[in-house]
Amino acid sequence: MNSYSYTATDSAGKFQQGVLDAADLTDAIAQLAAQNLSVLSIALRDEAEVSKERLGQNFERNLSQLLAQRHEWITALDAACDELPAGSTRRELQGLSRQLRSTRFDGPLPDLLQNASIIQLLPLLGETGDGTGSQCPLREWLSRMLKQRELRTQQRKRFIYPIVLIGLSLLLLIGFAFFLIPIFRDMFNDFGLSLPAPTLLTFWLAEQATTYLLRTLGILLCALLVFVPVVWYWRNRSLSNRLFGRLVAGTSSNLMAMSSLTGTLAHMLNLGAPLAEALRIAGKASRSYVYELAAFDLSKQIDQSSNLNSSLSSRVLPPSLLFALQAEPGGLPNLQLLQAMSEIYSDRAKCRVDLFTTLMPVFAVVAIGLGVGFVVISLFMPLVSMITSLA
């Protein structure tokens, strides 16, 4: 069956344009004549264009079938929330449930996929039941989501223990500044000793923490108010990736982003989405600015290419992903490989988070030891000099 585009006039002389499927050109003209249309021009449509259009139609149909079952999603999410303890994971699931209840589904279906929450929910039922596969069990979807959420939570919690240690050490140093350091300062002044630079620095810091406490706290607060937005903007815009490229590709946040990207890409392709559209959706699901731009650029390559089997290239996305997108005969994506890559990236992210969580307390103890050691040594350096001179 071929697809033809035509321009014709009806009995009233009005122009009409459209497309139709026919066995050959004669059959196409006969179909138009049966509709009382006079053919002005008719042409066989490009096979690649027709293939993309049919993929888009299949995707919208499958997506519509999935969204028609959203009430099952709401029930499943509510049931999962009831079994979870109070916390960030439960709040996120409740937010997804509210998102499903409040989102209108009567508009263009692809527009819904601009919403990251809806993208996150699509794998819940996984695949359509019209011959393309079986439904993804809620247990598997929830397990993947909880795993990703656990990694994000663990990333935040890994700083709690070091922050507590550093806070306690700062309180100890402030106690030194109020009670111990003034004794040494008065003693050194009485002896008229020439103080070395480390001791002068320690006395200056102690003075800032005692005599000028309010001013010091104000400066620290202003620095914090500047630091937090800068860090948020830096992470939101993925500036580390844009500045250092693949040197930072193995960080835990990038690995989690790639896990979301490849997993969503596999689900979208399984739903019948055209590759270019699936890349744009997966890029948004990654929640990484630099990967979203890279996926969008790759989708433009596919849209602009007349050869569907042309090799893809990207300076940001890993070669393994580009290979998976063309691994099947005919240059088609390998969905099993994409899903396996998603699991691998997730496991690598967990290993990095576990390693960093293990090392952070060690680094914190070392930093505290260096700080306290610097204060103690700087206070005893003048005494050592004085004893040496007396000897």
Image (tube, rainbow, N blue to C red):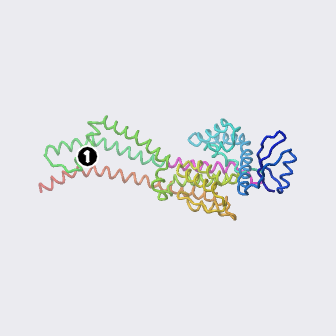
Q: Is residue 138 left or right of residue 186?
A: right
Picture coordinates of residue 301, whole percent (x, y): 60, 56
Helix, strand or loop for the magenta stretch, by majority: helix
Q: How many marks?
A: 1
Seen in the image, is 119 located left or right of residue 157?
right
Q: Is residue 263 left or right of residue 196?
A: right
Which quarter of the rendered picture does the N terminus lie within? Answer: bottom right
Q: Amino acid at mark 1?
A: Thr
Percent across and percent down for residue 164 are 41, 45
How crowded is the residue under tag 1: few (<14 C-alpha within 10 Å), some, or many (20+)? some
The structure residue drawn at horizontal position 48% and vertical position 47%, both measured from the top left corner, is: 235
| 10 shown above or below 344 | above
Q: Please, which residue is most extreme toward the right here?
A: 34
The image shows residue 56 at horizontal and vertical percentages of 71, 50
Task: Name the quadrant containing residue 243.
Answer: bottom left
In the rendered image, the quadrant that contains the C terminus is bottom left
The question of residue 132 being in magenta is answered with yes
Q: State the residue at coordinates (56%, 41%).
A: 88
Q: Secondary structure at mark 1?
A: helix
Q: Indicate whether residue 118 is drawn in magenta.
A: no
User: In this view of the protein, which residue sits in the foreground, 305 or 147?
Assistant: 305
Q: In percent of the image, x 22 and y 41: which residue is there? A: 182
- Outermost residue on the bottom side: it is 329
Q: Position of residue 232 (x, y in %)?
A: 47, 44
Q: Which residues are magenta?
A: 131-155
Q: Is residue 179 above or below residue 374?
A: above
Q: Nearer the viewer, residue 375 or 282?
A: 282
Which quadrant would residue 93 be assigned to in this image? top right
Asked if residue 377 lies left or right of residue 16, the reply is: left
Tell me the residue that label 1 is attached to: 202
